[in-house]
Amino acid sequence: MDQFSKDSFVPEGQVAAKRTKSRDSLFLVASLRITGRPGVTEVRVRNLSSGGLMAEYLHPIDIGTAVEIELRGVGKVIGEVAWTAAGRIGISFASPIDPMQARKPVSGPKAGPHKDKPIKSIL
């Protein structure tokens, strides 16, 4: 028998990764502020869960760096860099969020032509 189970890619006898929360794959642009660095950087969020996210970030950053990320529908979330690899970072949130809030449609002005009510004649 080979070392891998037919049902998964986890070697037999080993426990799957520590992740216990489901994560949601998506594409979302968010604003990232890194403690100790000026300004805000836009990042592309690829996975989001109640406890953290994975985003594209091409610059060097240390694990454990405190960050603040602003997510559409959720707002500002405080966390820290949990891992880095090949142009991506994992951020662990200090407090859980509701990831479904980021999926809600953005409200804005109604689309379509604007029709004014007819002006009533005084005559």
Image (cartoon, rainbow, N blue to C red):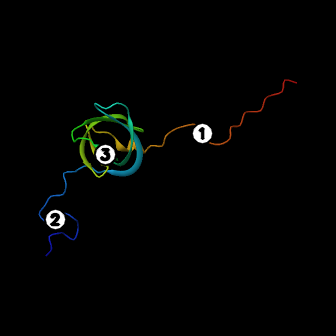
| Residue at the right extreme, as displayed | 123
Compared across the picture, whether 33 is left or right of 104 comes to left
Q: Is residue 63 above or below residue 23?
A: above
Q: Residue at x 28, y 32 (%)?
A: 35
Amino acid type at circle 3 is: Leu
Q: Earlier in the sequence, mark 1 or mark 3?
A: 3
| Nearer to us: label 1 or label 3 | 3
Give the quarter of the figure containing the N terminus: bottom left
**Residue holding disc 1:** 110
- Upstream in the sequence, badge 1 or badge 2? 2
Residue type, numbered disc 2 = Pro
Horizontal and vertical percent for residue 44?
39, 46
- Comparing 92 with 50, the one in front is 92
The furthest residue to the top: 122
| Mark 3 surroundings within 10 Å by alpha-carbon count, few (fewer than 14), some (14 through 19), many (20 or more) | many
Q: Amino acid at mark 1?
A: Lys
Q: Residue 27 in the image: x percent, y percent?
A: 41, 49
- The residue identified by callout 3 is 53
Instruction: Return the residue at label 2.
Output: 11
